[in-house]
Amino acid sequence: MSKKSIYGLTYEALQDWLTNHGQRRFRADQVWNWLYKKRINKFTDMRNVNKETIALLEDNFVLHTTKEELRQESEDGTIKYLFRLSDGNLVETVLMRFNYGLSVCVTTQVGCNIGCSFCASGLLRKNRDLTSGEIVEQIMNVQKDMDIKDQDERVSHIVVMGIGEPFDNFNNLMGFINVVNHDAGLNIGARHITVSTSGLAHKIYEWADTGTQVNLAISLHAPNNELRTSIMKINRAFPIEKLMKAVDYYLERVNRRITYEYIMLKGVNDHKEDAEELIELLSDKRHLSYVNLIPYNTVSEHDQYQRSDSSTIQAFYETLKENGLNCGVRWENGADIDAACGQLRSKQVKKETTAG
């Protein structure tokens, strides 16, 4: 059996593992500090940890289960990484620079089965879930890259919006959040982490019951069932009525604002009538709603979709705003590289398949 990533252990799990293997509990503090504060690249770099503990860790865990396959760097500072996993699969991770800090978008699955008809992530079907360690390692890879370039730069925000449906990999998602949020580790605040779901209603109930303060975003993209089903097949299983019922439960339990992602597709979902339906849909929860209008990144395999005109996006925004719905327009980062999520991975897989 191949060794597991050390990053897949929560602090409590590491404590238990060490004590079960005859080590003192305080060793977990030492190991955790070397992993996440000093960010070592090999276990033998842990200078105040005894040789017996180091040998145990080396026999059972690894620090690297991924390696950088290639990267694309944008003029605006965005970096898109393509990482190869130990089984040969590829995943994307993106670093974005904002005035509030460095934000990293992580992937939770190899491929995606949600099947949104406009999305590059679903061009390749789901192969498997990522382990929590593989998700954490994406953050560690980016942070270590930043350490080399600038010792003062730190990843301050995380968005779980990469390839895959996070709530379809719920347990590993929660393990990942536990690790990156832990105050003795990377200490990235819960309110600096956002998880996006395509609308798995049953998992929204489960998410609400955890009581987490991590931000929730829902990929809505349409204000009614007919339109949403035509572009997101997940709506057949979880139509808007089921989704909104789960949203109401979440708001009652957690009382935190939800962001609704809305990709602007020319002539599809960008009409004034669509804006008016969206206002009506969210009317009873507008005080805890924020609509994020997203100009579409064109994908060659989905050439039936085009980006809405800037004037149309502006008119849609103004309609929402004038009717008291909080909203904004998210202009993309990395416009000069493969900006759409999944594009870089899809291109590389096709290249390797053709070469093979």
Image (cartoon, rainbow, N blue to C red):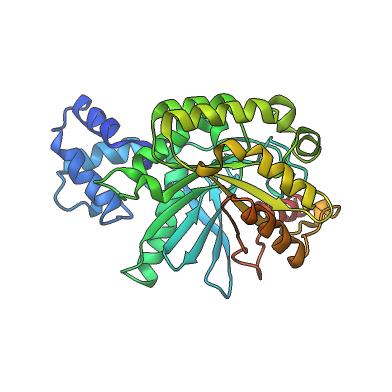
Q: Position of residue 59 (x, y in %)?
A: 31, 37
Is the residue 196 above or below the residue 22 in the image?
below
Give the residue drawn at x 84%, y 55%. Answer: 303
Which quadrant of the figure contains the N terminus?
top left
Give the residue drawn at x 66%, y 51%. Answer: 342
Give the residue drawn at x 61%, y 66%. Answer: 334
Q: Position of residue 117 (x, y in %)?
A: 78, 43
Is the residue 21 above or below the residue 274 in the image?
above
Task: Write down the quadrant of residue 31 in the picture.
Answer: top left
- Name the residue furthest bottom: 75
Question: Which residue is at the front of the view, 332 or 310?
Answer: 310
User: In the displayed structure, does residue 231 sit left or right of residue 68?
Assistant: right
Residue 221 in sight here:
yes
Residue 52 in sight here:
no
Task: Write down the quadrant of residue 122 in the picture.
Answer: top right
Q: Position of residue 275 (x, y in %)?
A: 72, 49
- How many numbered marks does the figure carry? 0
